[in-house]
Image: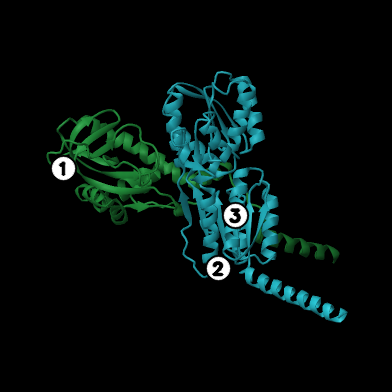
Chain colours: A cyan, B green
Amino acid sequence: MKTHWLKLVLATVVATAAMLFTQTSFAQPASKGKIAVVVSTLNNPWFVVLGETAKARAIELGYEATIFDSQNDTAKEASHFENLIAGGYKAVLFNPTDANGSIANVMKAKAAGVPVFCIDREINSTNAATAQMLSDSYSGCVKLGQYFVKTVGKEGEYAELLGIVGDNNTWNRSKGFHSVVDRYPGLKMVAQQSGEFDRAKGLEVMESILQAHPNIKAVFCGNDAMALGAYQALVTAGKADAVKVFGFDGADDAVKLIAEGKMTATGMQFPKLMARQSAEYADEYIKGKRDFPQKIPVPVELVTKDNVGKYGDYGKK
Amino acid sequence: MRAVRWLIAFLVVAGVFWRFPLFHIVPLKQATAEKVAATFNAVQFADAFWTDQLPPSLDKAVKVEVLLPAIQADRAAARKKYARSIGLGESYFYFVSGSGRVLSASDDEVSLAVTEGGTNAEVVLEAGLIFGNTLRDGTGLLSASDYPNSQDFNDISAELNHIVETRVLPKLHEQAKVGAKISFAGCAEVADEASDLSPLKVVPIRAEVQ
């Protein structure tokens, strides 16, 4: 009797194990290879969304995907590229740290036969990356500049927080904004400092600007992280109602502040759209496609209190 | 004997360095000149584009009397047939030419009726400050992929807009009297399918009284 029970238990265990093995085999088909997602920094929620979306789409397409954080350091980025080339990755979805400094890394990957697809930030080369999906920062900031003049007026002092000085997006945004605002001589920029695209740095820089220039009517920030830092500084200084804050990115926190009437506007980039598309391009490349446009602009949309309901979750609802 | 060996070794090393120098000495003036030459000159580029490349392409612009009825009949079909899209967004451009009668003129715009006897503004020529990339991207003659640094590409926009403001608009303001017939060519940007295209807003490349 005892032996009979023992046989029954053993048979059940074997059958269950066989079922589990079969299910696992069906649920996880063999991977198509590895895709690397190299992101400039994960210290900003916007880039976390960019990286995570690229990774998720690569996994959906049947690849193993890993995120590498360059921490805004080209040396760390170079080391990631060495590792991923040696590690047999089939493609890189790349958010560069420096338009010039990152070219060598992309060239190294290219020499090793690994295609690189730049997302959001560009490199100053048209023969290194396979394709580059870039937010049209200039155009987006032209729209922000026009809205700035409309809401702030044609006269008054304002400040600007720049992003990372070596990044093209910093200057494309600043130039787009100034291509409009500089046409109105009554609008005077009394301070222009780098907040390095960082929230804490944005707060710190804004605090010092407010001490030197207490009468500013507005601040234009090259990204939403700095805008959120600047807003925090304004709240602490009791000036949140007196100074209009303009950002760029379309970060969820910024969109919420616009809906609450605490921030004036931002430019909605579409990180999820760019990230997903980069993974799809990598998949197409691996399957044999080669003719990709080098630079693919992604328009930026102006988000204000009038249309904020249409936006959220890093894109259009 | 030892001295000869040293001499030979010295000559060999000197020869190698002469053939493959570790550094070059360049006069500062020459280095600066080379740097300036390597820098993209958006002013020169935009001027050459405006003078040489743009005029022959104006014939390729879709006629306004063809485009407007096409948009009215089927907006999506008109877009497919006549518009130019770039990148991944919803916006697109029309490169359009034609003529119309001035209904009104202000510092910022000139409204035209294109249909014979029409009283509604069907086309508005932008005539104030010109911003953005409508002109650069609307003709289809320039592509971001040709420019390693997008700052150069964006500088072209600023210069083209400046050319419109200084070479096209002063004459337009002078000639755009109510009732005058204006012949024009230019680019229109459509932000998305919800945009109101009545009237169609055009950044003029050419605008003159017929």
Task: Report if residue B40 is visible in the image.
Answer: no
Q: Which mark is residue A94?
A: 3
Residue type (three-letter) at the residue carrying disc 2: Ile
Chain for disc number 3: A
- Rounded to the nearest whole Å, what is the CA distance between mark 2 and mark 3? 16 Å
Mark 1 packing: few (<14 Cα in 10 Å), some, or many (20+)?
some
Mark 1 highlights which residue? B115
Check whether the beta carbons of the residues at disc 2 and disc 3 lie within 8 A of each other. no
Mark 1–mark 2 Cα distance, whole angstroms, equals 53 Å
Tag in front: 1 or 3: 1
| Horizontal and vertical percent position of residue B77 | 29, 55
- Where residue A241 sits, quadrant-wise, is top right
Mark 1 belongs to which subunit?
B
Query: What residue sits 76% from the left and 75% below the top?
Result: A12
Return the residue found at the far right.
A2
Q: Position of residue A49 (x, y in %)?
A: 60, 48
Q: Name the amino acid type tagged 3.
A: Phe
- Residue at 60% x, 59% y: name it: A92
